[in-house]
Image (spheres, rainbow, N blue to C red):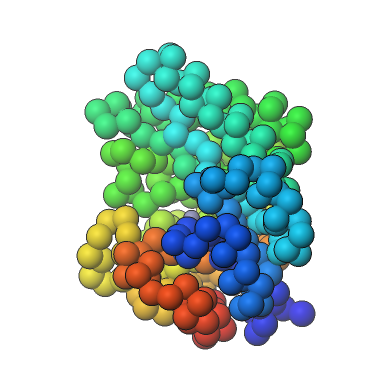
């Protein structure tokens, strides 16, 4: 099985079908034959993590990860401590729903020098590592496109994420490769090779040309200009054989019937991933 001519490696994020509550997403994924789910924390509400875990275990759908932790930098020590508490809560939630992994969007504070944000991110991840180890939950640093460096994430290249993961040097911390954030980077192939077994997860969607909104205009695979298959091959060449996660933030696609969107995702997965 290579998982590429069938759907064995296909995972979809609950944010891709944002309007569905978790119970609807579970039913929709089952109907569409999608074997993996990455759960966003907002979809743990209103039923809570414990009940969500029961629903997910009963569904037979594999929980790939929980999105998201992170957002470590803050102007005050009190706010940085709050961020650590929230990350520990996310780790508890991941354990409760059977998610082996939390994806970290590291954070950035407008006006704070990036070097300071990056130092606070390194310190923040280091501070929650023991808690993650004890819970048996891994942490993946996800670099975000540099257009988000001002307010969302000061880790913007896979090289930076690799540097951070290597410095922390624990089997609990790895990286997420998301084609949307990284496809433009001339060092991407070499940094994917360098990451190797530290690649904990792999996200796909497409970069629309032109992009009409910096956050919510991602395309289904094939709607944009990312060489998704080539990047997927680089990732697989490292020995990665985990899920391929479809994560699409899109006002356009959120307006569609999610059942129809899931079928389009399956078609484009076969054709473009
Ligand atoms: Zn992602």
Quarter of the image for the C terminus: give it: bottom right
Instruction: Name the foreground residue: 173 vs 83.
Output: 83
Residue 257: % across, % down: 43, 75
**In screen coordinates, is 69 left or right of 92?**
left
Which residue lies at the image location 36% right of the left edge and 41% below the top edge? 152
Instruction: Name the foreground residue: 95 vs 46.
Output: 46
Which residue lies at the image location 66% right of the left edge and 73% below the top edge? 30
In this view, the residue farthest toward the front is 47
**In screen coordinates, is 219 left or right of 123?**
left
Residue 241: % across, % down: 70, 65
Quarter of the image for the N terminus: give it: bottom right
Residue 9: % across, % down: 67, 71
Image quadrant in which you'd find residue 33: bottom right
Residue 200: % across, % down: 64, 52
**In screen coordinates, is 111 left or right of 224?**
left
Image: 22 above or below 104:
below
Image: 119 above or below 54:
above
Q: How many marks?
A: 0
Image: 88 above or below 206:
above
Residue 86 visible somewhere in the drawing: yes
Which residue lies at the image location 57% right of the left edge and 83% below the top edge? 270
Instruction: Name the foreground residue: 198 vs 188.
Output: 198
Which residue lies at the image location 42% right of the left edge and 79% below the top edge? 222
**In screen coordinates, is 81 left or right of 212?**
right
Residue 199 visible somewhere in the drawing: no
Image quadrant in which you'd find residue 3: bottom right
């Amino acid at each position: 099985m290579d998982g590429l001519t069938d759907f064995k490696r296909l995972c979809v994020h609950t944010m891709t079908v944002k309007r569905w509550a978790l119970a609807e997403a579970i039913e929709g994924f089952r109907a569409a034959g999608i074997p993996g789910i990455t759960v966003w924390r907002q979809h743990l509400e209103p039923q809570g993590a414990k009940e969500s875990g029961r629903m997910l275990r009963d569904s037979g759908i594999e929980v790939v990860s929980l999105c998201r932790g992170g957002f470590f930098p803050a102007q005050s020590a009190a706010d940085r401590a709050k961020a650590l508490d929230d990350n520990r809560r996310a780790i508890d939630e991941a354990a409760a729903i059977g998610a082996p992994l939390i994806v970290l969007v590291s954070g950035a504070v407008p006006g704070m020098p990036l070097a300071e944000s990056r130092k606070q991110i390194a310190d923040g991840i280091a501070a929650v590592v023991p808690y993650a180890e004890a819970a048996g939950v891994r942490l993946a640093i996800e670099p975000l496109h540099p257009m988000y460096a001002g307010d969302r994430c000061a880790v913007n290249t896979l090289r930076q994420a690799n540097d951070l993961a290597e410095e922390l040097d624990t089997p609990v911390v790895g990286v997420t490769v998301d084609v949307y954030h990284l496809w433009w980077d001339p060092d991407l192939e070499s940094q994917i090779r360098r990451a190797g077994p530290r690649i904990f997860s792999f996200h796909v969607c497409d970069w629309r040309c032109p992009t009409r909104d910096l956050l919510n205009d991602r395309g289904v695979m094939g709607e944009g200009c990312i060489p998704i298959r080539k990047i997927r091959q680089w990732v697989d060449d490292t020995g990665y054989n985990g899920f391929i996660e479809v994560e699409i933030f899109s006002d356009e696609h959120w307006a569609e019937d999610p059942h129809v969107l899931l079928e389009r995702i399956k078609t484009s997965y076969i054709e473009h991933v």
